[in-house]
Image: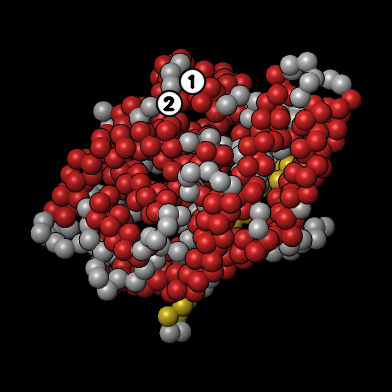
């Protein structure tokens, strides 16, 4: 390393200090004040990244001639990717709207008359046998949509202007996806194949659900799907006691050689806009997670998923801050990959071997749960394909987004939204705070299923009792941050390019 690259180290030290401040500020915006921590305004902290990019350019230029060190070249590449993405969202008004909208959605109280519903209540109502209660969920989400619509559209228009200003041919969404490691030429064929190869299974789920609901000819709306799925056979929420989730997780991880209690991970519970959220405040020594205590197996799923995120954070051993995978700058991490690491544990909740060992479910209940799990996975893939199509349309010129909400429901769920249904597409913190995110959950399941299949092949059916598994995951997938491109990490860990095959096996139960 020469002196000019010393400047790169200094720049990254400042970058990491800022990432830690933004992590802490975001955490406090979720949990309120904590002892010994002063709350900063996340938008103000985020805006400070802009100054780093002004400093970065000469540093990167000076560093370029530093003898072909591949790590330095990679650091420079990630910096440039971040800078391009930063310009898509750097407008001060956009920065402000982004954090403001996230806070408003997270803090929103769902109220009708003198009643207030938590998100956990909404989850329960959406599965109610009373159609009016299911419809109420949509009305309540429609209220939130109405409250944030104007500012959401303003933010979208600022983002469109920023993308146009960059002079590329694509939309804001195209540019953002590219920065986050999912250029359309990689993403679109996978999504298309998933759509085509799950369409028939989805139609079959709808047919069986209608039958089980007692009316094969029933007219259903998209919001009836959670209820309909449960008709296929459900496990009462009490069979998934919340207090057993953490011990089950901890035992499972111990089996693969990971001592959860020894890791610097903090957990808090709260009713907020996401199912859960993990913030790597300081990588690798301070990771915090929020868990929304949704009923039944959902909180298990959330705890496992979030812990998968946390394991990646605390297992990262790379020295360069820009390669550690902090989530704050688009381009500095690959969210699809991070979600994949989360789903390595998230998918376990639908794994027969896990269910047999770590839950009290009977064999018959396990079979019922697995059928429900597969149906829900199909719902989630198809709903997310719908979300992705809507969000990408949102950044195109002249889109009638309300009309697109109807089109995608019909196209991906095969169910028409009633004409009098309120629009709800803006009733999510993702559009503002995590733009172009939904495809990450879809790819995450492809990545996780492919890795789990490879783990099974490598370690055999007893892999849940093999401490070498944890070491393998750490080495192959968690430790080196963004040093290697994510597609390389997946290929080297599993022996093949990412495809839909392992996931389809998993979801179809074949
Ligand atoms: Zn996640």
Left or right, 72 with respect to 384, comes to right
Q: Are marks 2 and 1 in contact (CB under 8 Å)?
A: yes
Pointer 1 residue: 491
Q: Disc number at residue 498?
A: 2
- The mark nearer the N terminus, 2 or 1, is 1
The residue positioned 48% from the left and 44% from the top of the image is 169
Does 115 appear above or below 63?
Answer: below
The residue positioned 78% from the left and 15% from the top of the image is 67
Total marks shown come to 2
Residue 221: name its quadrant.
Answer: bottom left
Within 10 angstroms of label 2, few (less than 14), some, or many (20 or more) residues? some
Question: What is the secondary structure assignment of the residue under circle 2?
Answer: loop
Of 374 and 460, nearer the camera is 374
Locate the C terminus by quadrant: top left
Find residue 119 and report its horizontal and vertical position in percent: 47, 64
Does 161 appear above or below 438?
Answer: below
Find residue 215 and report its horizontal and vertical position in percent: 11, 60
Residue 308: name its quadrant.
Answer: top right
Toward the right, the furthest residue is 3
Residue 327 in view here: no
Find residue 88 and report its horizontal and vertical position in percent: 60, 50
Left or right, 420 with respect to 308, comes to left
Within 10 angstroms of label 1, few (less than 14), some, or many (20 or more) residues? some
Find residue 423 and report its horizontal and vertical position in percent: 36, 68
Question: What is the secondary structure assignment of the residue under circle 1?
Answer: helix
Of 394 and 35, nearer the camera is 394
The residue positioned 10% from the left and 59% from the top of the image is 217
Q: Disc number at residue 253?
A: none
């Amino acid at each position: 390393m020469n002196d000019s690259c010393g400047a790169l180290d200094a720049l990254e030290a400042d970058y990491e200090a800022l990432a830690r401040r933004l992590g802490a500020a975001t955490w406090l915006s979720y949990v309120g004040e904590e002892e010994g921590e002063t709350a900063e305004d996340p938008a103000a902290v985020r805006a400070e990244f802009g100054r780093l990019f002004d400093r970065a350019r000469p540093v990167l230029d000076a560093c370029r001639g530093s003898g072909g060190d591949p790590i330095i070249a990679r650091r420079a590449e990630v910096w440039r990717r971040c800078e391009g993405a930063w310009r898509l969202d750097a407008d001060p008004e956009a920065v402000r709207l982004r954090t403001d909208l996230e806070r408003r959605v997270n803090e929103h109280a769902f109220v009708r008359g003198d009643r207030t519903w938590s998100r956990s209540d909404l989850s329960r109502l959406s599965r109610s046998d009373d159609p009016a209660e299911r419809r109420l969920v949509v009305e309540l989400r429609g209220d939130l949509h109405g409250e944030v619509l104007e500012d959401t559209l303003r933010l979208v228009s600022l983002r469109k202007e920023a993308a146009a200003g960059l002079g590329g041919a694509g939309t804001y969404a195209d540019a953002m996806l590219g920065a986050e490691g999912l250029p359309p030429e990689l993403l679109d064929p996978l999504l298309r194949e998933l759509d085509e190869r799950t369409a028939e299974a989805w139609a079959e789920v709808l047919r069986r659900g209608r039958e089980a609901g007692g009316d094969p000819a029933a007219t259903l709306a998209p919001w009836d799907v959670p209820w309909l799925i449960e008709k296929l056979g459900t496990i009462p929420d009490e069979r998934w006691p919340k207090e057993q989730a953490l011990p089950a997780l901890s035992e499972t991880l111990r089996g693969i050689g990971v001592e959860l209690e020894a890791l610097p991970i903090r957990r808090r519970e709260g009713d907020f806009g996401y199912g859960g959220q993990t913030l790597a405040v300081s990588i690798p020594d301070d990771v915090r997670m929020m868990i929304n205590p949704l009923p039944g197996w959902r909180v298990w799923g959330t705890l496992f998923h979030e812990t998968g995120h946390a394991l990646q954070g605390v297992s990262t051993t790379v020295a360069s801050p820009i390669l550690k995978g902090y989530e704050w700058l688009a381009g500095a991490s690959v969210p699809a990959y991070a979600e994949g690491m989360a789903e390595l544990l998230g998918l376990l909740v639908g794994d027969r071997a896990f269910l047999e060992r770590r839950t009290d479910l009977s064999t018959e209940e396990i079979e019922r749960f697995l059928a429900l799990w597969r149906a829900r996975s199909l719902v989630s893939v198809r709903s997310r394909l719908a979300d992705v199509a809507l969000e990408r349309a949102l950044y195109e010129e002249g889109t009638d987004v309300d009309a697109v909400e109807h089109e995608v429901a019909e196209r991906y769920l095969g169910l028409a939204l009633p004409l009098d249904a309120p629009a709800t597409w803006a009733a999510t913190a993702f559009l503002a705070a995590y733009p172009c995110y939904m495809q990450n959950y879809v790819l995450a399941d492809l990545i996780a299923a492919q890795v789990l299949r490879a783990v099974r092949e490598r370690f055999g059916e007893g892999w849940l009792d093999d401490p070498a598994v944890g070491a393998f995951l750490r080495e192959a997938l968690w430790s080196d941050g963004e040093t290697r491109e994510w597609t390389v990490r997946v290929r080297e860990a599993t022996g093949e390019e990412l495809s839909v095959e392992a996931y389809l096996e998993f979801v179809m139960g074949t």
